[in-house]
Amino acid sequence: MKYVDEFRDPDKARSLLRAIEGLVADIEICRRRPLQIMEVCGGHTHSIFKYGLESLLPEAIEFVHGPGCPVCVLPVGRVDDGLVLAEHPSVIFTTFGDAMRVPGSKKSLLQAKADGADVRMVYSPLDALGIAKANPGKEVVFFALGFETTIPSTAMTVLQAEREHVANFSVFCNHITIIPTIKAILDSPELTLDGFLGPGHVSMVIGTAPYQFICRHYRKPLVVAGFEPLDILQSIWMLLRQLAEGRCEVENQYRRVVADAGNDPALRAVQEVFELREFFEWRGLGSIDHSGVCIRDAYAAFDAERRFSVPNLKIADPKSCQCGEVLKGVIKPRQCKVFGRACTPETPLGALMVSSEGACAAYYNYAGVQLGKVRRSRAAPDRGRARGMP
Ligand code: SF4
């Protein structure tokens, strides 16, 4: 297939759904309870709801939304640390758009900008480096966020800054890694998972080998999945086929993008610039060992945490927020007490309602308060028609 509409073909979707229904009948777990499938990446959560896949699939399949939205898992204290940097009089603070509206304990970066801080939205760390070169009298700090998907671009920008002797550029590093996080979820007694849809973009960098421990030690299958509706349906079919046949393997549905060996130049750049932190604090998941990276001593000149005094604040989420429980997959977004009332995309209380990958934003935008209706429509005669598919 070459064109995006081929990945949304309704006939192929219907035949995959029929195949999935057939497999459900063969899986013993489904006779006792719904299968719990975690989609690790927030991009998958959005595709599942945007295209109405949840309502098309058999009720024996339940999605558990994973923590793969890097903006969502950033704790309030790190947002406040970023605000301290952003409000420094000599600083131009640069950030991806998603992070602009994430609430800190008192305000967001967008509100800090309205109050006079020089906060600028960028599309890549190279944009931030360009701003630094254009403003030699200012300190330009890049708010670095994201999993292995975005770590290479930050690493390569630091390497370029060093090559070009740009002395007024630094990185406030909040990059995180996916493997220790999946391990923390698998070790959690609160969750019973039967399989994973593996993150497509992260896997493009790290490849498929790092997931092998999930099959070997935890006996759970994982299928690296793409983001179009047929990608997701085919990945679920592959997962179910493993379960029906008693297999437990890492499979790669997203071969058109993900090489099993990953991306070697990207991994080498990351290895050159970053090293693992002993631990990193996650919203809702607490401190997870070796789950974040920091800048190596050799590149300390580009580390904002060493160039400035960052308070390293520890701040609890507001009492009414249940972001942590949603991130752990313990409750669904609509079960949060403030979902759709005090917390909406216009007035977010938590990052999950802001980010383009946040589970609460996905529910609000695509399922929202209509979710009960969507669920009832599972039995409707036109259930083969998914939203957004022709
Ligand atoms: S509805 Fe708002 S407060 Fe509740 S979990 Fe979602 S983002 Fe957090």
Image (cartoon, rainbow, N blue to C red):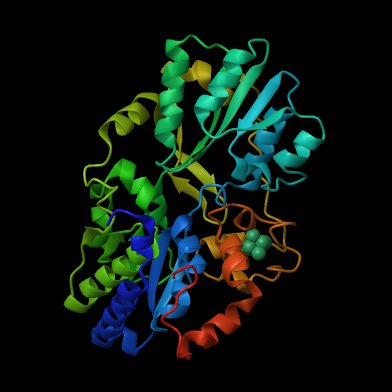
Q: Is residue 280 above or below residue 26?
A: above
Question: Can residue 179 be seen in the rendering of this structure?
Answer: no
Nearer-the-camera pick, 278 or 308: 308
Q: Tell me where residue 218 appears, x and y as whole percent.
A: 28, 63
Rendered image quadrant of residue 6: bottom left
Q: Is residue 383 above or below residue 332?
A: below
Rendered image quadrant of residue 133: top right
* Quadrant hosting ligand 1: bottom right
Q: Is residue 92 above or below residue 174?
A: above
Q: Tell me where residue 343 appears, x and y as whole percent.
A: 72, 62
Q: Quadrant of the C terminus?
A: bottom left
Q: Tell me where residue 197 appears, x and y as whole percent.
A: 35, 62
Question: Can residue 107 be seen in the rendering of this structure?
Answer: yes
Nearer-the-camera pick, 59 or 124: 124
Please indicate whether residue 15 sits to the left or right of residue 284 in the image. left
Q: Residue furthest right?
A: 115
Q: Quadrant of the N terminus?
A: bottom left
Q: How many discs appear?
A: 0
Could you tell me which residue is drawn at 41 percent across and 42 percent down?
149
Could you tell me which residue is drawn at 59 percent across and 78 percent down?
371
Please indicate whether residue 219 sits to the left or right of residue 280 in the image. left
Could you tell me which residue is drawn at 32 percent across and 75 percent down?
11
Q: Tell me where residue 209 appears, x and y as whole percent.
A: 23, 48
